Image (cartoon, rainbow, N blue to C red):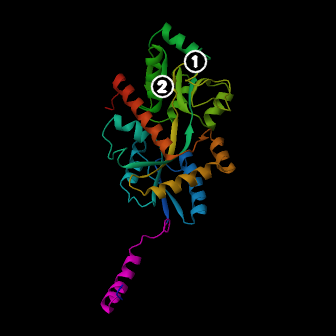
Amino acid sequence: MPSPTRRQLLASLAVAPLSVAAQPAPWPSNPIRIVVAYPAGGVSDVVARALGDKLSARLGTPVVVENKAGAGGTIGMDMVAKAAPDGYTLGFSAISPLVLNPHLGKPPFDPVRDIAPVASVMYSPVLLLGTQATAARDFRQLLAAAKAKPGDVRWATSGLASLGHIMLEHIMQGSGVQITHVPYKGGGQQLNDALSGQFEVLSTNAGPAVMQHIKAGKLHPLAVGAPKRLQALPDVPTLAELGLPAANLTSVFGIFAPAKTPAPVRERLNAEINHALALPDIRARLEASDNVPTGGTAAEFARQIAQESESNARIIRAANIRLD
């Protein structure tokens, strides 16, 4: 084989530095931002910051939490959808902006093409509670009252087309009863009116304040939306146990990334989030607020999101739910 000429040697030396410079910087080499789709101070904010601390320690880079609340999580998730897909912008949100909001209007992003599920973090059980306005002390008694007087039982939720509203529609469709929906704008006034017996039933996420009212006998647990019974309420059945699996919904939260974020980055993040969720202090923090850690693969999380989106689409069409 002939030896390379001087011109060939010089050409190879000139190209080599360019090829080295073109190599991407190792990830992560910059601070990571987690966009929380809800206000500061809430459970989702607290959990996101705790996860951020664990990720920072494991990845060796700062993790900054930024709150972008509004439109039921859509504003924060839109920011994630439109961020550079480089692994430095993540989102922490319930799955509602992906599985519920798109069937009620046109969101500013495509939940399938623009967002990549990274890891399921937790689910927040939904409690179905009786107030002092009803004599029902279990779910079957509630259905009996609703069948005896169609429309007399009033069910309060945190809003039109909220998760509680979807649960109610599934229950009416699955049991053949007629219950009057009372939508609120958020949960604060809803809980106050529940305590004064302004309606018979409410659906609300589990939490310390709600549990205190249950222990005091001011609210009566009738059923729970959760994969299994809660440790705090072992005698309260899930809606699936009561024969209404489609209504057995929970508020599921997770970490998301822009859709084109490199697969190795998303896989590393999934592994680190699962590691964090297995730590005793993270689990204790979640369970103290009546939330349940989940974890698992990104593919499992994506399947769950797709299945719930399809189910929501069917019930929204059947019930003709619209946001006017």
x, y percentage for residue 270? 53, 52
Q: Residue at x 45, y 38 (%)?
A: 305
User: In terms of secondary structure, where does tag 1 sit?
Assistant: helix
**Amino acid type at mark 2:** Ala
Q: Residue at x 57, y 52 (%)?
A: 273
Q: Residue at x 65, y 41 (%)?
A: 287
Which image quarter: residue 150?
Answer: top left
Horizontal side of residue 6 vs 159, given as left or right: left
Residue 160 visible at all: no
Which residue does the numbered mark 1 point to in the structure image? Answer: 139
As drawn, the residue found furthest toward the front would be 1
Q: Which residues are magenta?
A: 4-30
**Amino acid type at mark 1:** Phe
Q: State yes or no: residue 67 in magenta.
A: no
As displayed, is residue 83 above or below residue 312?
A: below
x, y percentage for residue 37? 45, 48
Q: Quadrant of the C terminus?
A: top left
Horizontal side of residue 228 vs 113, given as left or right: right
C-alpha span from label 2 to label 1: 16 Å
Horizontal side of residue 185 vs 214, given as left or right: left
Q: Nearer the viewer, residue 274 or 197?
A: 274
As displayed, is residue 19 above or below residue 210?
A: below
As displayed, is residue 16 above or below residue 194?
A: below
Residue 246, numbered circle = 2
Q: Residues within 10 Å of mark 2 (few under 14, many from 20)?
A: many
Residue 243 visible at all: yes
User: In terms of secondary structure, where does tag 2 sit?
Assistant: helix
x, y percentage for residue 297? 53, 46
Q: Residues within 10 Å of mark 1 (few under 14, many from 20)?
A: many
> Is label 2 or label 1 in front?
2
